[in-house]
Image (cartoon, coloured by chain):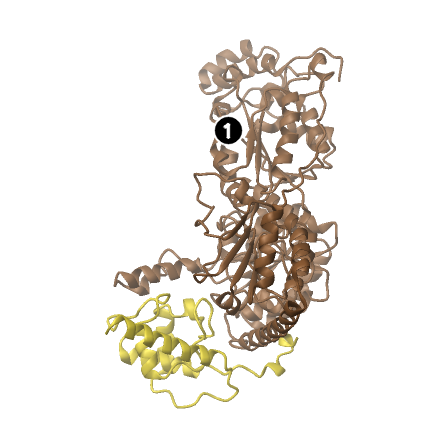
């Protein structure tokens, strides 16, 4: 803490506020300037000596006269972020958080956390979302509490629905008496977090630095406790910019963080679930967001092999190896034959025949909100455990093992044989199906997936993001064996615009591991906030993006076709408002303009393999690369 | 037609389509198309059939319907009264003759190469 006399933001802003107001009226400004800013001087290297006509926000050029001295509050805020091991802060710069921005880059030397320059707040939060699903710890997103959080809202909702922690810091000017020009008013709000309160797990608006430290640590802990979710801490501009008073500094500390252990299912319920599963003729395990950590996949394999049960991976996380013989995800038969279904952290329990016994283990039962309806239809289950699935699996495996008799073991062996055969038949059928339209142009989605797989299969790879719908060809043809091979799909709020930034965020997490990150990029998703490609180029984030460019919001075409059909109207006009043609978007040129190596549009399937090889070399050199591929619809 | 008869028809047609979809033939398409395949291709695009079935009829959101579509009569019946997921195409939208062109287009699609000849599809 500096011993210099402090001049707080309240004092120096008074002059600036007058100047800002005067600037609204050029004549008044000209008259008032000498009195209001008697010793105004341009900042070093800055241009004009008087505020430019039409400036509406408090202008840093006229604001620098009276400097606050002493250690600013935002330096302590950064100490807290460092204590929480926040590695990156994704942000589109904004004046309501300029204090902490400056602390990050100078006081913190822009290292842990590093400031990631984003072009849209939706990109910031979605990058943080994708990063978490690879790294396993939250990234911070820094934004205006008003316009920034409004931009971010969709991505926040997506993270909420996907049970992903994102640590959001929202700047605000709460004290109206100290606000500057008109923009500072427009960028201020009574209750910033109210905008997203329905779909964040927790929020707070600290009134002091001590309060900030406690709330930041609490927010982190809440975000990381299943069911996980995004949190918001509103950081007041004064709190960031005012010097820390000596009497406050002596009391400041960062509380110790102890992340809560996730809840395990009740022992009685676990025993009942084991009894049902062991005695079932055709048990099916359905997993969505089950594997919370890399250990989750191993545990699920252990349970499935203990029971020799079918596994349907809904792929909210990387739950189960794609070519494990018990993986029956591509088949409808297991669900048709099932007499007991175990659902692990499901978004929605699958419909089952009457009489089928249902077991649910889901942490979302512990925390639910009312307004947004992502909680899905009420499931009438037989055993309901409000618990974390991964934390419950060890006890369930043990309970099942204790109940397995020799008779059951023989039955399990026969079941395993039957499921293995079905699995092999499924793989063969997928390969046979992929051969159709193999040489077609536009390029088939099966060919697209196969061409990418051929180039990465011998690399250390991760499929970090996909957008659009490629008929599951990636999962039908690629061999997913490692927990990091797929961080899980984007089945949060299923809003368009997640794919590209999540891919960039995931690739950032993989960068230090030297892993090849792959993204299948749809055209509609690309167009939401394409500035993220610049972010990828600027921060040298190696990501191989191969486009599934079907030149349409394809699903919406089918919706309109169905509407027209039901209403007995013209079905041929469904392209209006749903296609992205006339002109065709040149995605490669857009990416190139952002500094990303890009190729395409590629329409000849024989040109795709060589293009991927070229792109892969760029990615291996540490840069992003994109290939625009014109594809079949799905 | 009674509802149960429609449902039975739909099941039979879907079963036939499913059986066809699971048997990739390795021989050329069977007969000379009754319709005009070029005209059928234009209709296949303008009517939006490609959105679910792909430009080659290889499938996607909907099932594969080429290069061996249902027999012509069953094909027409199904298009007029499809199962719930597919929009129906009444005669006002597409005539029987035009359906013949589309049928011809689907029949004209090349058979897939033998899988053994495609290195990328080897295990």
Chain B colour is yellow
Quadrant of the rendered image containing residue A319: bottom right
Q: Which residue occupies the foreground of this view, A516 or A358?
A: A358
In the picture, measured across the screen, residue A317 lies left or right of residue A27, that is right
Measuring from the top left, give residue A188's x and y in whole percent: 50, 25
Residue A592 percent across, percent down from the top left: 60, 54
User: Chain A drawn in what color?
Assistant: brown
> Which residue lies most toward the top here?
A35
**Can residue A520 be seen from the camera position used here?**
no
The quarter of the picture where residue A247 lies is top right
Tell me, yes or no, if residue A499 can be seen here. yes
User: Under tag 1, what secondary structure?
Assistant: helix
Q: Which class describes the residues within 10 Å of circle 1: few (<14), some (14-19), or many (20+)? A: many
* Place of residue A604 in the rendered image (x, y in percent of width and height, measured from the top left): 55, 72
**In x, y percent, where is residue A537?**
65, 49
- Where A236 sits versus A407, above or below? above
Residue indicated by mark 1: A192
Q: How many marks?
A: 1
* Residue A525, placed above or below residue A189: below
The chain to which mark 1 is attached is A
Residue farthest to the bottom, as pictured: B31
Looking at the figure, which quarter contains the N terminus of chain A?
A: top right
Q: Measuring 68% from the left and 17% from the top, which residue is drawn there?
A: A244
Between A51 and B123, the one nearer to me in the picture: B123
Q: Quadrant of residue A486?
A: bottom right
**Left or right: where does residue A341 sit relative to residue A70?**
left
């Amino acid at each position: 803490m500096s011993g210099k006399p402090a001049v707080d933001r309240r004092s120096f802003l008074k002059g600036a506020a007058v100047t800002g107001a005067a600037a609204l009226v050029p004549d008044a400004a000209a008259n008032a300037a000498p009195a209001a800013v008697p010793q105004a001087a341009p900042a070093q290297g800055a241009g004009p000596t008087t505020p430019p006509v039409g400036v509406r926000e408090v202008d840093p050029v006229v604001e620098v006269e009276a400097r606050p001295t002493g250690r600013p509050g935002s330096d302590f805020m950064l100490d807290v972020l460092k204590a929480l091991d926040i590695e990156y802060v994704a942000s589109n710069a904004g004046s309501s958080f300029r204090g902490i921005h400056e602390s990050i880059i100078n006081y913190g030397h822009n290292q842990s956390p590093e400031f990631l320059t984003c072009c849209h707040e939706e990109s910031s939060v979605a990058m943080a979302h994708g990063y978490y699903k690879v790294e396993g710890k939250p990234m911070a997103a820094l934004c205006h509490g008003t316009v920034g959080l409004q931009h971010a809202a969709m991505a926040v909702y997506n993270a909420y629905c996907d049970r992903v922690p994102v640590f959001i810091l929202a700047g605000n000017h709460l004290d109206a008496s100290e606000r500057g020009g008109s923009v500072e008013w427009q960028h201020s709000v009574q209750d910033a977090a109210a905008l997203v309160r329905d779909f964040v797990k927790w929020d707070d608006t600290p009134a002091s630095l001590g309060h900030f430290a406690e709330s930041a640590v609490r927010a982190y802990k809440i975000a990381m406790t299943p069911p996980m979710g995004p949190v918001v801490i509103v950081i007041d501009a004064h709190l960031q910019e005012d010097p820390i008073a000596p009497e406050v500094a002596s009391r400041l500390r960062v509380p110790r963080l102890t992340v809560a252990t996730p809840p395990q299912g009740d022992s009685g319920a676990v025993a009942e679930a084991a009894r049902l599963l062991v005695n079932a003729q055709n048990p099916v395990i359905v997993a969505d967001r089950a594997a919370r950590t890399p250990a989750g996949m191993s545990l699920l394999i252990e349970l499935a092999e203990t029971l020799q049960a079918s596994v349907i991976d809904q792929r909210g996380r990387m739950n189960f190896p794609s070519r494990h013989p018990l993986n029956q995800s591509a088949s409808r038969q297991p669900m048709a034959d099932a007499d007991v279904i175990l659902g692990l952290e499901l978004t929605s329990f699958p419909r089952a025949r009457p009489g089928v016994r249902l077991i649910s283990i889901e942490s979302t039962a512990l925390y639910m909100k009312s307004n947004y309806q992502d909680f899905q239809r009420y499931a009438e289950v037989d055993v309901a455990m409000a618990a974390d699935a991964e934390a419950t699996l060890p006890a369930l495996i043990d309970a099942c093992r204790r109940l397995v008799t020799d008779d059951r073991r023989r039955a399990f062996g026969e079941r395993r044989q039957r499921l293995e055969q079905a699995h092999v038949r499924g793989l063969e059928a997928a390969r046979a199906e992929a051969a159709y339209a193999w040489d077609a142009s536009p390029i088939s989605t099966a060919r697209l997936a196969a061409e990418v797989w051929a180039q990465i299969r011998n690399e250390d790879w991760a499929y970090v993001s996909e957008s659009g719908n490629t008929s599951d060809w990636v999962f039908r043809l690629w061999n997913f064996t490692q927990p990091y091979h797929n961080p899980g799909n984007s089945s949060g709020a299923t809003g368009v615009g997640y794919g590209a930034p999540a891919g960039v965020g995931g690739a950032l997490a993989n960068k230090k591991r030297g892993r090849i990150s792959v993204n299948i990029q749809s055209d509609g998703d690309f167009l939401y906030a394409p500035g993220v490609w610049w972010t990828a180029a600027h921060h040298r984030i190696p990501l191989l993006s191969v486009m599934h460019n079907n030149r349409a919001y394809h699903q919406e075409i089918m919706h309109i076709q169905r509407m027209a059909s039901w209403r007995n109207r013209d079905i041929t006009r469904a392209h209006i408002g749903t296609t992205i043609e006339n002109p065709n978007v040149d995605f490669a040129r857009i990416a190139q303009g952002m500094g990303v190596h890009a190729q395409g549009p590629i329409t000849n399937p024989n040109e795709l393999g060589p293009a991927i090889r070229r792109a892969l070399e760029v990615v291996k050199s540490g840069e992003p690369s994109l290939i625009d591929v014109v594809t079949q619809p799905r | 037609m009674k509802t149960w008869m429609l449902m039975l028809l739909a099941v039979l047609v879907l079963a036939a389509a499913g059986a066809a979809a699971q048997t990739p033939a390795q021989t050329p398409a069977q007969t000379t198309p009754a319709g005009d395949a070029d005209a059928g291709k234009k209709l296949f695009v303008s009517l939006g059939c490609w959105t679910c079935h792909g430009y080659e009829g290889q499938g996607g959101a909907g099932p594969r319907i080429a290069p061996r579509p249902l027999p012509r009569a069953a094909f027409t019946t199904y298009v007029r009264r499809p199962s719930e997921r597919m929009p129906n195409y009444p005669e006002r939208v597409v005539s029987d003759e035009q359906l013949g062109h589309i049928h011809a287009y689907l029949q004209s699609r090349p058979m897939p190469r033998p899988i053994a000849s495609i290195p990328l599809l080897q295990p």
